């Protein structure tokens, strides 16, 4: 029960030597058929020992020391004069591992490839090199291919941008059938001729697969995959939205300047700091937080106001403007400019805001201070700049809103789409076409596709019109994709597993090994 593969030999003893379980056995004294002529013989020519590595037992490596007879063939005309006997299920010619251990290592190699498989085997007390593990995988036979009723075809990258392969699967079972070199029409057509009986071929809209399917299986119905159709439409919609980029900009809010923007609010009699510096900090703090609430970023505010980015960050991080004055404000102080402030206020009210000119004027009246004092005072009396327009949505954001289900959109996205469609009639028309195509795709009403193509072609929208023209060239397969339940979903799942296998082998596996692992790791349903 525990070691059924040893039932055909006579176990003499079991030893535990240096952490290794050592089973000493011998072959029973029975007649064995000659492998060449089949004649039974029990005449012993000689005996020798074979050491066979076996699967570990109780977490310890196991070795079988088997005494084997070499027999003499009794058929005089047989070229095989002597031969070694084999224990069924235990020994193979020239093998130093039991079939049970070989199968275990093959499963590890298929699942984990070379280096990772060797590391796991070492942890399981089955010492093997990565090269031996890969040789065992390559020695495994391919499964017998039965021609499927529904075939899925898709390409995958062996080396992105340079080399590609083609994967063929049984769409009904989701099992890979073959991996072909390249993604041309001829290899696919040749494989289809060798496997007749295919009724449906699910493919993407690549021209090579169209020609290959038509040449190799003209009786099969070709079905264009719905996922690729929606993907192609998404690219066309993005090009159309990009062509109307100017319609995405939100209009700037109306700005009504205050009647006297140069006069700061009266905060006298409060406990808050007053004075020129305090007023400037208060005003700048309020301006920065107002722009942040409108959705502008730090860099955009800095560009708009002509400030440094770190200055804007300092104002943005302060919850109250008085936090920026800690340790700096000591109350209002007298200034050389105090006698000239009424004159400057009058000149600013008259519309003169040139600090250099005002400094020159008051200097002639006896002011001996610096230009910077005058410049700061005039800057505090300048009107608040017009508010920045809200940031416009990106092309990808608008494309995503157009392509998603209306009931999956947030309230803000609904309002954004309504505003854009109200400003741009072309994008409003585009939204209707996308909704109509989505309805055909989800309800499998592909019979309405010709009318949809005619309507889109008449509207002449950038990108989408070219998409409709391409559908006309592959109309039969597209209608089948929009009316039948078949699609390339199982193929995409297998391609995703192929990417995992490639990552496991760090992109260094040859096509033969990758093909073997793809076909052997398939889940048999």
Image (spheres, rainbow, N blue to C red):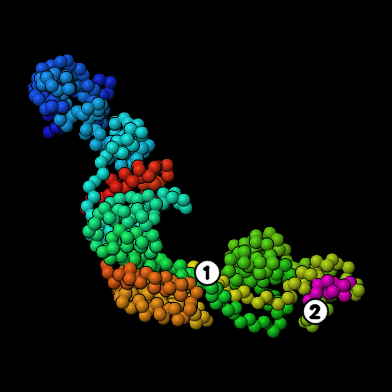
Q: Position of residue 271 (x, y in %)?
A: 65, 70
Q: Residue at x 73, y 72 (%)?
A: 380
**Neighbour class for label 2 at 10 Å: few (<14), some, many (≥20)?**
some
Magenta segment: does it hold 353?
yes
Do the residues bearing badges 2 and 1 touch, measured as CB atoms within 8 Å?
A: no
**Along the viewing direction, whichever of 513 and 16 lies nearer the viewer:** 513
Q: Residue furthest bottom?
A: 259
Q: Residue furthest top?
A: 46
Q: Is residue 22 above or below residue 387?
A: above
- Mark count: 2
Residue underneath mark 1: 394
**Along the viewing direction, whichever of 396 and 466 lies nearer the viewer:** 466
Label of residue 410 in the image:
none
Q: Principal SS element in the magenta part?
A: helix
Q: Is residue 186 above or below residue 120?
A: below
Residue 397 visible in the picture? no
Callout 2 secondary element: loop
Q: Quick check: 152 left or right of 402?
A: left
Alpha carbon of mark 2 to alpha carbon of mark 1: how far?
41 Å
The magenta-colored residue range is: 352-363
Q: Is residue 237 above or below residue 43?
A: below
Q: Position of residue 163 (x, y in %)?
A: 43, 50
Q: Position of residue 215 (x, y in %)?
A: 32, 60
**Neighbour class for label 1 at 10 Å: few (<14), some, many (≥20)?**
some
Q: Residue at x 10, y 21 (%)?
A: 75
Q: Residue at x 91, y 74 (%)?
A: 364
Residue underneath mark 2: 352
**Along the viewing direction, whichever of 19 and 48 lies nearer the viewer:** 48
Q: Position of residue 487 (x, y in %)?
A: 30, 64
Residue 8 visible in the picture? yes
- Dividing the picture into quadrants, the one containing residue 476 is bottom left
């Amino acid at each position: 029960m525990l070691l059924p593969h040893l039932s055909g030999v006579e176990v003499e003893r079991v030893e535990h030597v240096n952490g290794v379980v050592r089973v000493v056995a011998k072959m029973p004294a029975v007649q064995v058929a000659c492998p060449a002529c089949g004649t039974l013989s029990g005449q012993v020519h000689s005996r020798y020992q074979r050491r066979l590595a076996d699967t570990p037992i109780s977490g310890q490596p196991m070795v079988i020391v088997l005494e084997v007879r070499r027999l003499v063939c009794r058929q005089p005309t047989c070229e095989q004069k002597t031969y070694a006997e084999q224990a069924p299920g235990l020994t193979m010619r020239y093998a130093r591992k039991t079939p049970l251990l070989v199968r275990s290592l093959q499963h590890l190699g298929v699942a984990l490839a070379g280096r990772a498989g060797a590391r796991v085997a070492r942890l399981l007390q089955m010492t093997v090199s990565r090269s031996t593990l890969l040789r065992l995988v390559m020695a495994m036979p391919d499964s017998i291919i039965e021609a499927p009723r529904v075939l899925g075809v898709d390409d995958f990258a062996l080396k992105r941008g340079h080399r590609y392969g083609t994967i063929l699967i049984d769409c009904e079972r989701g099992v890979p059938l073959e991996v072909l070199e390249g993604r041309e029409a001829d290899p696919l057509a040749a494989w289809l001729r060798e496997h007749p009986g295919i009724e449906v071929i699910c493919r993407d809209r690549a021209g090579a697969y169209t020609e290959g399917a038509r040449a190799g299986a003209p009786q099969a119905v070709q079905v264009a995959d719905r996922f690729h159709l929606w993907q192609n439409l998404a690219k066309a919609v993005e090009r159309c939205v990009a062509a109307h980029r100017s319609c995405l900009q939100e209009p700037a809010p109306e700005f009504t300047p205050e009647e006297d923007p140069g006069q700061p609010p009266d905060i006298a009699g409060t406990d808050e700091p007053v004075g020129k510096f305090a007023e400037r900090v208060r005003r700048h703090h309020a301006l920065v937080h107002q722009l942040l609430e409108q959705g502008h970023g730090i860099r955009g505010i800095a560009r708009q106001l002509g400030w440094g980015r770190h200055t804007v960050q300092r104002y943005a991080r302060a919850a109250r403007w008085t936090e920026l004055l800690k340790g700096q404000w000591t109350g209002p102080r007298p200034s050389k400019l105090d006698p000239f402030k009424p004159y400057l206020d009058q000149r600013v009210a008259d519309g003169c805001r040139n600090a250099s000119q005002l400094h020159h004027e008051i200097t002639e009246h006896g002011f001996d201070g610096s230009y910077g004092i005058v410049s700061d005072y005039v800057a505090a009396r300048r009107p608040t700049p017009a508010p920045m327009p809200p940031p416009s949505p990106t092309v990808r954001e608008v494309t995503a809103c157009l392509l998603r289900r209306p009931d999956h959109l947030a309230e803000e996205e609904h309002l954004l789409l309504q505003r854009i469609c109200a400003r741009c009639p072309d994008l409003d028309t585009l939204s209707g076409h996308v909704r109509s195509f989505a309805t055909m795709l989800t309800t499998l009403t592909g019979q309405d596709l010709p009318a949809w193509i005619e309507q889109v072609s008449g509207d002449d929208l950038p990108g989408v019109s070219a998409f409709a023209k391409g559908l006309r060239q592959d109309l039969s397969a597209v209608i089948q994709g929009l009316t039948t339940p078949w699609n390339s979903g199982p193929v995409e799942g297998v391609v995703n597993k192929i990417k995992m296998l490639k990552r496991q082998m760090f992109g260094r596996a040859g096509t033969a090994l990758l093909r073997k692992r793809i076909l052997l790791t398939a889940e048999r349903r």
